[in-house]
Structures are given as structure tokens and as C-alpha cells.
Image (cartoon, rainbow, N blue to C red):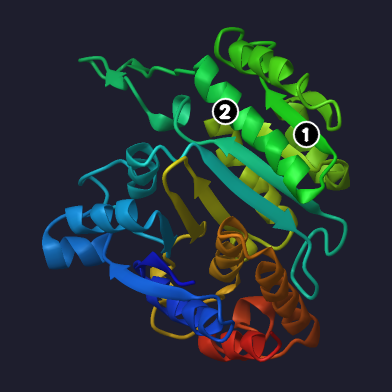
């Protein structure tokens, strides 16, 4: 059976890492067909808008998208193309794994294997209700957290724990101070946790979470939290294991899912073959899991690890002298 996915090649280094990722996927016989669509600066130049209707229609039709990084121009259009995609398709779960990899410039070359599950559609990060007083002295925004949004993201985290054989979910909050918004999230999480007696649940205040992640990250398994906290924590976790070049992300909703590299477009190295494709490749592995091909997802991750261990054709950020495509070909050769 074949599956058509929407492919967004992106801006900056996006096309290079996407070409590398598709090369690897094409060697795996995973039954994918590609429908290419534009977004970001490329779309603005070609179609006059950052998110053309044809791109939205493609994602809605195929329900699965693989996306390279996009640029949102300062002062134009949306505050963030990524946020807009999440809102339009109600991609409520942002799933960010962080795992130790060999031969990387990492604070923790071993011992880290955790997932941050971040609520993706509510909270301060969405930027609703932003106002600035006429004199420019006071700025405000609205932070909205709902019981429904909290319940479905916490339930997603516990279901993910069961599905992947993980044993603990840590609910991260600031309910000691933010008693309304974080309080509702924590109260809802406690209620959901009672339905999963086989999964350990603990609670941790967000500032302590950050300290504990830096000191003893091995104590965490799955973290579930609200939007803004999740944005910060997931990048912190990426920093523990070598940076955003090894950080994939999945944005999951009921009717669509978008898989991506979470790093930026790196225009300073675009077109030079220096970009590390691992984040997007790992995002593609998440996509294969989502499509019901966990064995092939595991093979892809194993091939990445084996290539890192062999130091074969690594890109400059990983200490090698290879390029984006030679690194991808080395990975493909080990699948």
C-alpha cells in the first residue's frame, strides 16, 4: 500500500536536508509518494503568500506532511508559520524526543532518553489578546488554558507511554503561582492519571524541572506540559544531547500530522552542503511510527546511530568532513 505525503522543502538549508531525507526514505521501500508544496519565503516569492491555499489543501487531503524549516518574515504575515499550521489543523500534541547519540558534542553522550509532550494550541505561546497601551508603557496578553485542551494532551502523553513501553509521566506546571491556568492543567492531569494505574505519575514545578534536567536527566521518561513551558523545556532537552541538529518534532492532531526538524533555516550555510540532516531524518522516523511502520522507523534510527558511531561522512557540526548528501548516503547504506 502506498501513502501520499505532503512535502514542504522549506527555506535556507531546508531543501538540502529534505533531499537527503527523501534519498534515505527512497532506499527503505516504505511505500511513500510525495506531493510537493510551498510555504515560507519560497511561497511568498512564487505565490505572494506564506501559506498558499494549495498547500493547505494538500495537507488536508494527505493528512501527513514532512516539513523542512520555514522563515516567517519579520513584520509580515503571521507571527509564526508553524504556529499558524498548528492552529489551522488543530495539531494539539507537539512530541519532541531527546536521546543521547554517540560521537556528538553533548553534555550527556549516554543516559538521556526522554520525550517532551507539549500542548500545542493554547496558553501564552499562542499570543492571543496582545495589547500595548497608547503610551507604550504597558503590554498585556491573554493566557487561556482549557480543561479539554489539558485533558487531551495529558491523555496523549499517557497513551504514548503505554504504546512505547515507558513507565513514568512527569506533569510539569507552575500551579503554585499560576493558580488559575497552571492550576487547571494540574488538576486535570491528576484526574487523567487515575485512569492509568500502570504508569507512574509525578508532578514537578517548571523551574525545578529545568534544574533537574541539567543535573539528572536520566530520571525523566515522558514530560507533559503546557505550550510555553514545553517550548522552553524541549529546547533545553535538545541542548543536553547535542543541540537542535539532532532534534526532531511531531505535531499531531486528530485529522492531520506534520513532522519536522525543529531547528531554523540557517541561511548562513544554505547551499554549502554543510547542513546536518539528522533532525529531519529523525522526524521522518517519527512519521514512520505514526504510519504504522515502527520496525522501519527503528531501522532508520539504528542506521543513524551506526553512522555516528562509525564517524562516516559526518557533517562539520559533528566533527566530520562530509556533506549533507554524503552523510545521508552513508546512513542509507546501513539500512
> Relative to residue 83, is residue 312 depicted above or below?
below
Q: Residue at x 85, y 40 (%)?
A: 167
Residue sitting at the far left: 48
User: As drawn, which residue projects farthest toward the top?
Assistant: 179
Q: Are marks 1 and 2 in contact (CB under 8 Å)?
A: no
In the picture as drawn, the residue positioned furthest to the front comes out as 1
- Please state which of residues 319 and 15 is positioned toward the viewer in this rendering: 15
- 103 in relation to 321, above or below: above
**Crowd class of label 1 (few under 14; some 14 to 19; many from 20; radius 10 Å):** many
Q: Quadrant of residue 93?
A: top right
Where in the figure is residue 25, as x and y percent of width and height? 54, 79
| Residue found 82% across the figure and 48% down from its top | 165
Relative vertical location of residue 320 with respect to residue 73 in this rendering, above or below? below
Residues 164 and 203: in front is 164
Q: How many marks?
A: 2
Q: CA distance from mark 1 to mark 2?
A: 14 Å
Q: Nearer the viewer, mark 1 or mark 2?
A: 2
Residue under the point 36% across and 17% down: 140
The numbered disc on residue 152 is 2
Query: In which quadrant of the rendered view does residue 197 lie?
Result: top right
Counting residues from the start of the chain, the first of labels 1 and 2 encountered is 2
Q: Of residues 9 and 23, which is closer to you in this image?
A: 23
In terms of secondary structure, where does tag 1 sit?
strand
Left or right of 246 on screen, residue 111: right
Residue at figure coordinates x 56%, y 86% from the top left: 27
Residue at image mark 1:
169
**Element type where label 2 sits in the image:** helix
Asked whether residue 225 appears in the rendered view, the answer is: no
| Residue 198 in picture, x, y percent from top left | 86, 31
Amino acid at each position: 500500500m502506498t501513502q501520499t505525503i505532503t512535502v514542504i522543502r522549506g527555506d535556507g538549508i531546508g531543501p538540502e536536508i529534505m533531499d537527503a531525507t527523501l534519498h534515505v526514505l527512497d532506499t527503505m521501500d516504505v511505500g511513500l509518494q510525495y506531493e510537493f508544496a510551498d510555504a515560507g519565503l519560497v511561497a511568498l516569492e512564487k505565490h505572494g503568500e506564506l501559506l498558499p491555499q494549495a498547500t493547505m489543501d494538500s495537507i488536508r487531503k494527505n493528512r501527513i506532511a514532512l516539513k523542512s524549516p520555514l522563515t516567517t518574515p519579520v513584520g509580515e504575515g503571521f507571527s509564526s508559520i508553524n504556529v499558524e499550521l498548528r492552529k489551522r489543523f488543530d495539531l494539539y500534541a507537539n512530541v519532541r524526543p531527546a536521546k543521547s547519540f554517540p560521537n556528538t558534542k553533548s553534555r550527556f553522550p549516554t543516559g538521556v532518553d526522554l520525550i517532551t509532550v507539549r500542548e500545542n494550541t493554547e496558553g501564552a505561546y499562542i499570543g492571543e489578546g496582545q495589547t500595548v497601551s497608547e503610551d507604550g508603557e504597558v503590554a498585556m496578553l491573554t493566557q487561556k488554558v482549557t480543561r479539554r485542551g489539558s485533558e487531551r494532551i495529558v491523555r496523549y502523553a499517557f497513551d504514548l507511554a503505554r504504546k512505547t513501553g515507558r513507565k513514568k509521566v512527569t506533569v510539569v506546571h507552575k500551579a503554585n503561582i499560576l493558580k488559575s491556568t497552571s492550576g487547571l492543567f494540574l488538576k486535570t492531569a491528576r484526574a487523567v492519571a487515575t485512569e492509568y494505574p500502570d504508569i507512574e505519575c509525578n508532578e514537578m514545578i517548571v523551574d525545578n524541572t529545568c534544574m533537574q534536567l541539567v543535573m539528572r536527566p536520566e530520571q525523566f521518561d515522558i514530560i507533559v506540559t503546557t505550550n510555553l513551558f514545553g517550548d522552553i523545556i524541549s529546547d533545553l532537552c535538545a541542548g543536553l544531547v547535542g543541540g537542535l541538529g539532532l532534534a526532531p518534532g511531531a505535531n499531531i492532531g486528530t485529522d492531520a500530522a506534520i513532522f519536522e526538524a525543529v531547528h531554523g533555516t540557517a541561511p548562513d550555510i544554505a547551499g554549502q552542503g554543510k547542513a546536518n540532516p539528522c533532525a529531519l531524518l529523525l522526524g521522518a522516523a517519527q512519521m514512520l511510527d505514526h504510519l504504522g511502520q515502527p520496525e522501519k522507523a527503528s531501522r532508520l534510527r539504528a542506521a543513524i546511530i551506526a553512522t555516528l558511531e562509525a564517524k562516516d561522512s559526518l557533517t562539520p557540526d559533528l566533527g566530520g568532513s562530509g556533506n549533507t548528501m554524503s552523510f545521508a548516503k552513508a546512513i542509507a547504506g546501513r539500512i
